[in-house]
Image (cartoon, rainbow, N blue to C red):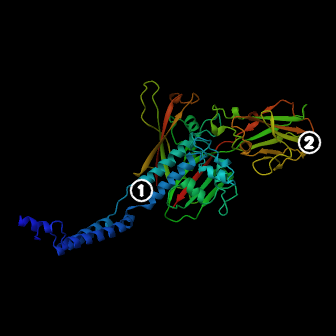
Amino acid sequence: MVNENAQLYTIEGISASILMLVTTFLVISSSSIVTPQETHITDMQLEQLGHDALLVLNTPLENGTSSILYQCIRDDPPSHPGLNAAFNANFTQLLNTRIFSGNDTLHFKVQLYYRDQSSGEIKPPIDFTSDGVGYFRENAVKVTQWVKMGSDVSDSDLQDKIILVEALIWRS
Amino acid sequence: MDDNRKRSLEDGQLSIDFIIGFTIFLISFIFIATMVSGLLINLQSRTIDYDAVAYRTGVVLVEDPGEFGAKGEPFYWQLLNLAYYNERNQLERLGLAIDRNSPGIIQRYKIEKFFTPVTLGCTGINSLCYPSDYTQKLIFGDYPYKFNISLKELNGTNSQLWYIGEKTPEKHGYIRRVVTMKNPGYTEINFTNSTSDTINLFINLYELNSPALHPAYRMNPYEENVTIFLKNVTIPGTQMVNLQFYQRDTIVDYPGHFPTDSPTITVNDGIFTAPVTIDNTTKIVMEAGYLRRWSIGENDPVELRMTFNQPVSDGFPLIIQDYTKIPPLTWAVMEIRIW
């Protein structure tokens, strides 16, 4: 005989299945994902551009010559106070030039790292230059480039050193 | 025994409730399954995808020299004569870098080929096909992305601008790259009015390709025009009466035999037909791809022998790199937009 073991009562079964389906539908269709990746994409673009700009500055334009980045450090070493005008002009141009629309609004601050001649310790970061705009924002990126200095640097502390140039770049 | 027999008659029977419930579940399952792909649209962000594709496209263009033929072959896809079906088929990937080890340094000849496509009737034309070659060999992916790529030289008033693609909508992926651009060199030969009426110009590809010199600063006759200017022409009426091209000591090309289509050797922008009157503006060009046309190896020595009706040199052979100037690299900005 048919008894009531493991039987699904029709009305309860139908209503339960409808409930489950409606719930699933609502959950899937209404879920919205907050995408912090978008911020990372912007960071990535900024980082790529900054890296490109430093690399371009660190590439000699002619065989046997020094790169502009090298020349800037050589001719205006960090022991000299003030901004490095040559570096600023070139770096600003590379960072901010857009082709069809107006120029971009990226700002930067550059520091140098190298080992102390006598102690061999890495010196605290030395402010090299900035474009003069204060940094008030969170979303900045850091890009770096190694520069091998020669013996033609007036600042004896930098002679024959490998210097890490670190640029902090942000959008305003 | 009786109970067991009775029960066995009803074993494996489905109740009407179960059949109704299972049917509703199956119908609903099929219904949901067909809708799921549509529901998930809300979960994807196209802007992120476009940015990623723009980034990838930028990397391929700026850091990759492109590829053709079998893996490991050289990177001068720009020399392929795309008018021929089999050469067009060899093209695998478009990239503008001078080689694999020089990311960020792009080559002017690749740029020119890249930014001068044809839009209709690509068959039989030595140009890239827009947009199919770009979507299949640069942007990739199944989704039919649209694009706009522009490149501007940062060289003061001489800045050149190249662009390709459609008008960009508001929503698009974007990346900007800064690059250096290698420009072709040129050779200047000064006449000396000495004893010999010939100039033998050696193009020693093996030495030019020396690894001691970074590719960005090399003269590259294989992939770039060899442009020769004749200077210090002091005797009026000086004429070039013969021009011959040698591979080692074997003559390859000579008057009446120079190909009439590109790549070839030209004198004052025309095919050489003796005699040609020479002055200080005379220009001889061995076009990029000419060596490949004659299947000359990348390290084979070749020679241009020019004969004149007046004494023009001391007769000693000239080595091309001694007379060649490579212009400085120039900076450029590239913008890539994908949607």
> Where does residue B305 sit, x and y in percent of width and height?
83, 37
Residue B128's image quarter? bottom right
The residue tagged 2 is B238
The residue tagged 1 is A38
**Is any atom of residue B81 visible in this view?**
yes
Name the residue: 26% across, 71% down.
B23
- In the rendered image of this protein, does residue B105 appear above or below residue B320? below
User: In the visual, does B309 lie left or right of B110?
Assistant: right
Q: Give amino acid for label 2.
A: Thr
> Where does residue A156 sit, x and y in percent of width and height?
53, 27
Q: Give amino acid for label 1.
A: Glu
> Where does residue A118 sit, x and y in percent of width and height?
45, 24
| Label 1 – label 2 distance at C-alpha | 68 Å
Q: Which mark is residue A4?
A: none
Name the residue: 35% across, 59% down.
A34
Closest to the observer: A50 or B108? B108
Q: Secondary structure at mark 2?
A: loop
